[in-house]
Image: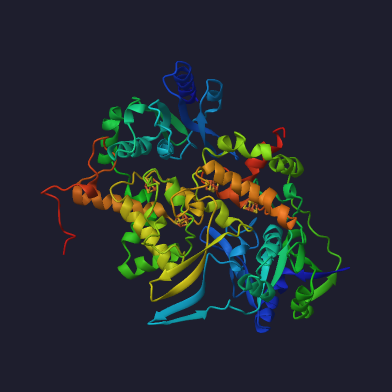
Amino acid sequence: MITQEKYRSKAKKLLADGSVKMVIGYSPGSTADRRRPLFVRSFEEADQLVLDSNCIANLSGYLVTEGLLSDEKRVAIFLRPEGIRSLNILAAESQLNVDQIIIFGFDSIGREVSSLSGEHAGEFSELISSIKENPPEKSSEPLLYQIEQMNPQERFAFWKEEFSRCIKCYACRQSCPMCYCRRCIVDSNQPQWVNTSSHTLGNFEWNIVRAFHLAGRCVGCGNCDRSCPVNIPLRLINARMAAEVLESFDHFAGMSTTQEPVLASFKKEDSETFIL
Amino acid sequence: MTRILFSDKLDNCVTRWQSAGFSVIGPVTKDTFSSYAAVEHASDFDLGIVLPDRSLKELFFPQTEPMLRYTIKQQAINTEDFTPPSGKRLIFGVRPCDAAGLSIDDPLFGWDYKDEYWFQRRNDSVIVTIACTKSDDFCLCTSLKLAPDTTNGSDILLRPLENNKGWQVEELTDRGREAFLTIAEFLQEGSEPAAPMAVVPEMFDLDTCVAWLQNPENFESKFWKDISMRCIGCGSCTYLCPTCHCFDIQDEGDTYSGIRRKNWDSCSFALFTMHTSGHNPRSTQSARWRQRIMHKFNYFPGKFSVNSCSGCGRCSRQCPVDMGITETLQKISTLHS
Ligand code: SF4
Ligand code: SF4
Ligand code: SF4
Ligand code: SF4
C-alpha cells in the first residue's frame, strides 16, 4: 500500500509538471487477483493505478509500440527487476532511447511489495549483478530438474506431447518484450521459411525458432508462459537456454544498456565446444 | 415422469455406443488442461468442470486440415483431394454454449459454398449436451440471450439431477433419438427433480450495444483506441472461441509437390489483412479489435440473423491482458449512441 501510494503521487507529479506524457502501470482486473495494463495520461487517471503482488506481467513490451516514443517525450513505467533487464536489452538492441524512460521499480516477496531505488536504467546494475550471482534454487523449478534428468528420447517425447497442444496463437511471442520484430520470421511468406500449419512439425519449428531467438535475451519474466492458453511450460525452454549461455559465455541477459548481444558478438576466449 | 439416465449406467452406455459404431468423445482433463477428446470409458470424462479450456469447434473445424495433394511433373499437374474423415461420433457432455456455437457457424459454412469438411462432421456427430449447474465469473450466455440450458445445436439435452445422480433426458432431434435408442435399456422412467440451473448474471444489455455498433458514426469513435490499447494482438481469443471461423489456405511443399492446407487464422493478427504491397487496411490493433466486435455483433447478424458469440467467456478467461468481449460490451452499453 505504501509503495502504491508513493508511486501514485510520483505519477501525478510527473504528469502534472509535464516531465512524462504517460505512465504505464497496472489497474484492477476482472477478478480479485487479476491485474490489467493501464496507460495513464492525466493526473486524475493516476488514482486508478494499483501496485501489489498480483502485478506480475512485464509491461516493457509496450514501450516499443509503434510511434509511442517517436515524439521524444518521456514515459514512466512500472517494472520488476526482470522488466528492467528487458528494458536494458531493448536499449542495447537500439529499439528505444533509454533516456526517455523513467522506471518505477518494484519487487515483491510473498504479498509484500517494495520499491527499488533508482529511476534510470543505469542505476540498477548492482541489483542485477546480485541476481546473477544468486540464481534461484534448483528446487524452485522441479520440472526443469526432472527434464534434465531425462534421456534424449524421453525429453523429445515430453516436448512432443507438450507441443502437440500448441495452436499457434502466438500469444507467447506477442507478450514477450524481446519479440519486437515488426515482421516475425514465421510471418514471412516470400519465401515461407517456417510452415504456418499447426501440426506437429509446424509446432516444433515454431517453438524451436522462438527458443533460439531468445537465447541470451530471455530475462525469465514469464510473460510467455502465463500467456500460453494451452499451458505449455514455455519458461522451461528459455530458462534452459539462459543457463546454457551463462555457462558457456558468462552472459546474463540484460545487465546493462550497452551489453553486447551474446549471439551477435565474438570473443577470442569464447568456448567453442558446440562446433564439431 | 421423465426418462432418466443414471450416472452408474453411463459406462454401459459408452460401451454400447462404441459397439454401435460411435467414437465416443467428451470433456477430458489432462494435467491442468481440458478439451473434448475421445474416451474409452465413462470414467475418462471430466464432467465436473465448468467448461473445457478448448472449445468444441476444433472437432468440426480443426486448426489445420489437409485439402489436397499436388504433384507437378513436366507438363502434367496431378491433384488428389483429401476428403473429410467420416465416421459416427457421439460427443457427450457438451456445454450449451459450445453446442450453440455450432449452430451459429452452420449458416456461415453453408452459405454460398457448402463446406463439406464442416458438414460431413456435422452429419456424423450426435451432440449430447449437459445443461449447466455451475458457472464462473466469465460465463455470459445470458447476456447473449442464451441460457445454461439452451438447446441450439444439440441433439439431446441432459438436465442434471441433484447430487450427480444422473440426468433427465430430452430428445431434440431424430439423430439424438436414434443414438439413444441403442441405450434404451439403460434408461429408466423416473420423477427425480432436476438440480437448479447455474445462475449467470446479465452483464450488459445486448440491444443497446448492437444499436451503438450499428451507428456508422461510432466506427471512428475514440472508444476503440482506448479500449484496445493493451491488446497485444495474439490469436488466443479467436482460437479458443467456439464461433470464430476464419481460415487461411496455405500450400506446403515446393513447386513440384506438396499439400494444400486449411489453417485457422485470426483477425487479431496484423498479417491477416496485409496486402502484397505492404499496405495494411487494418494497420492498428484498435482497428483489428473493432473488426472482431463489429463482425460478431453487427456484420454477422446482419447477414445470418444471429450473433457470432455464444457467451462461453473463453476470450476473457484466457486473454493475457485481461480483455475480452465482456469488458468491451459492458463499456459500450454505457456509451450514448
Ligand atoms: S502461446 Fe502457446 S499455443 Fe500459442 S503459439 Fe505460443 S506455445 Fe503455441
Ligand atoms: S521468452 Fe518469455 S520469459 Fe523470456 S523474456 Fe520473453 S516473455 Fe519473458
Ligand atoms: S483481446 Fe486478448 S486474447 Fe484477444 S488478441 Fe487482444 S490480447 Fe490477444
Ligand atoms: S466471443 Fe468470447 S464469449 Fe463469445 S463465443 Fe467467442 S470466446 Fe465465447
**Residue B62 sits in which quadrant?**
bottom right
Q: Residue at x 26, y 31 (%)?
A: A126
Left or right, residue A187 beside residue B319: left
Quadrant location of the C terminus of chain B in the rendered image: top right
Q: Residue at x 59, y 72 (%)?
A: B39
Q: Which sits in the foreground, B272 or B66? A: B272
Q: Whole-percent x and y of residue B11?
A: 67, 75
Left or right, residue B168 beside residue A220: right
Figure check: A100 above or below A32: above
Q: Which sits in the foreground, B13 or A254? A: A254
Q: Whole-percent x and y of residue A12?
A: 49, 19
Protein image colouring: rainbow
**Residue B119 sits in which quadrant?**
bottom right
Q: Residue furthest front?
A: B75
Q: Which sits in the foreground, B299 or B297? A: B299
Question: What is the count of numbered marks?
Answer: 0
Can residue B199 be seen from the camera position used here? Answer: no
Q: Residue furthest left?
A: A268
**Residue B128 sits in which quadrant?**
bottom right
Q: Whole-percent x and y of residue B54?
A: 58, 59
Q: Whole-percent x and y of residue B272?
A: 51, 54
Q: Residue at x 65, y 69 (%)?
A: B113
Can residue A210 be seen from the camera position used here? Answer: yes
Q: Which sits in the foreground, B138 or A194? A: A194
Figure check: A146 above or below A133: below
Quadrant location of the N terminus of chain B in the rendered image: bottom right
Q: Residue furthest right?
A: B1
Left or right, residue A273 beside residue B71: left
